[in-house]
Image: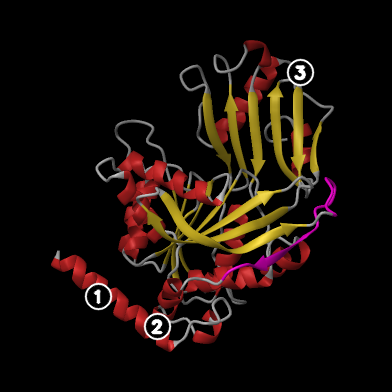
Amino acid sequence: DIFEFAFINKYLNDPDFEEMNGNSWNDIEVVTSKGYYKIPESFNSPEHARNTIRKMMQVGGAVLDEAEPTLDSFIGTGLRLTASISPVVDEEAGVVFSLRKLSGKMISKADLVEKYDSYSSEEIEFLDMCLRHGISVLFGGATSSGKSSDMQTILHDIFAEGKLRGYIIEENTRELDFVVRDENGRTISRVVHTKTREAKNSNTLDVDSDLLVKTSLRFHPNIIVPAEMRGKEAMSAVEAALTGHTVASSAHVQSVTKAYERILMLCQKANNNITEDMLMSIIVEAFPVVVFKQQLEDKSRRCMRIFEATGYNKREQMIEGHIVFQFFKSEESTAEKVIGFHRQVSSISPRLCQKLFENGCEMNLINKYNPSFNMRSNMQGNKDFIEKFINVDAN
């Protein structure tokens, strides 16, 4: 009612609502957790559609006009609006838009495992172990695959304990929420939430994700969370991970290995002086664990693979590593119902075990994911590392 188009409000109140897409002034569809459908309502005319969407954009401080015919805006902390008008789209279409409802409810770890079958309990425990003990993790997948909400669920319990300090970075508005309070209203979690702000003129500072990643280092965080890497902030995130900070982030990717190519492309925007081979080597070192999430044909969202990168082969120009966990789809699956199971298919590397152990992880927990790792192999790993370091230094 505030925006003077009540027919949209009706759909926003649906608990299954995820997104509304306006293909033109009189062609609007709604996406829910169960699928999509065309709605019978529409705007009165192309002009009515343009004027209404412009009003909504202004709520988030964006002015949609001929000078900027394509913009993003946010309405409070609950809705993200992207819209385009002529000349980007046909005049007779009026406006095209995507109105996306940001995740408003917290999904528990138990729900991810038992209700949605997105992960196995072992996968959740593994990712929790990594993030608590200095291993940076990248959550990858396509739009609406659930990667950001999964990252929030796993990190929420970590920050809720109030031991580790977090620095959160988001684009324009708050979607993640790690503020946890006790029964008396006192804040337990140690988290700084920040968001970017685009400069409107030469007198205001352009606060982008790259600036905020660099700023985060002065706040002594245990975990830095750039909610989504889209630009040159990826290079700063890689550098932060290499200097001992744990980084958890997400990116739009189509596969596990494409995740590293995506980060490489983003890093090259910030630094063209490093060779591609060297850059890929440090990216693999910075993000040894990648989670690949996918929305399947029945609209379920599953963790398809958790991958550990162990190095980069410069000669073959390929990432070395192995799948630790994988989702296997059953032959009994249909388009209406995907059936399958999650399974650990390989042990984590001794190198990853070593890093977890050095960062305080208990041996019995590490052995769940590599039963053969022990103190003897731990000492041998130290010896190999020292010898290689001396040889490189001598040359």
Proximity of marks 2 and 1: CB atoms separated by less than 8 Å: no
User: Can you give x and y, in whole percent of width and height, for residue 158 in the image?
Assistant: 54, 72
Please report the residue visible at 38 percent of the width from the left and 66 percent of the height from the top: 221
Q: Is residue 300 above or below residue 61?
A: below
Q: Is residue 94 above or below residue 199?
A: above
Horizontally, is 219 left or right of 94 in the view? left
Q: Amino acid at mark 3?
A: Asn
Element marked by disc 2: helix
Quick check: 275 left or right of 263? left
Q: Mark 2 and mark 1: span between their CA atoms?
A: 15 Å
Q: Which residue is mark 3?
A: 44
Label 2, residues with CA under 10 Å away: few <14, some 14-19, many ≥20:
some
Label 1 or label 3, whichever comes before in sequence order: 3
Residue 226 is left or right of residue 279, and the answer is right
Q: Is residue 189 visible?
A: no
Report the magenta stretch's main SS.
loop
Give coordinates of residue 88: x percent, y percent.
55, 18
Magenta segment boundaries in residue numbering: 332-346
Indicate the quadrant where residue 24 lies.
top right
Residue 209 or residue 309, whichever sits in front: 309
Residue at position x 32%, y 54% from top? 214
Residue to which mark 1 is pinned: 387
Is residue 336 found inside the magenta-colored segment of the image? yes
Q: 10 Å neighbourhood of mark 1: few (<14), some, or many (≥20)?
A: few
Measured Cα–Cα span from mark 2 to mark 3? 70 Å
Q: Position of residue 355 (x, y in %)?
A: 41, 74
Q: Who comes first in sequence, dot 2 or dot 3?
A: 3
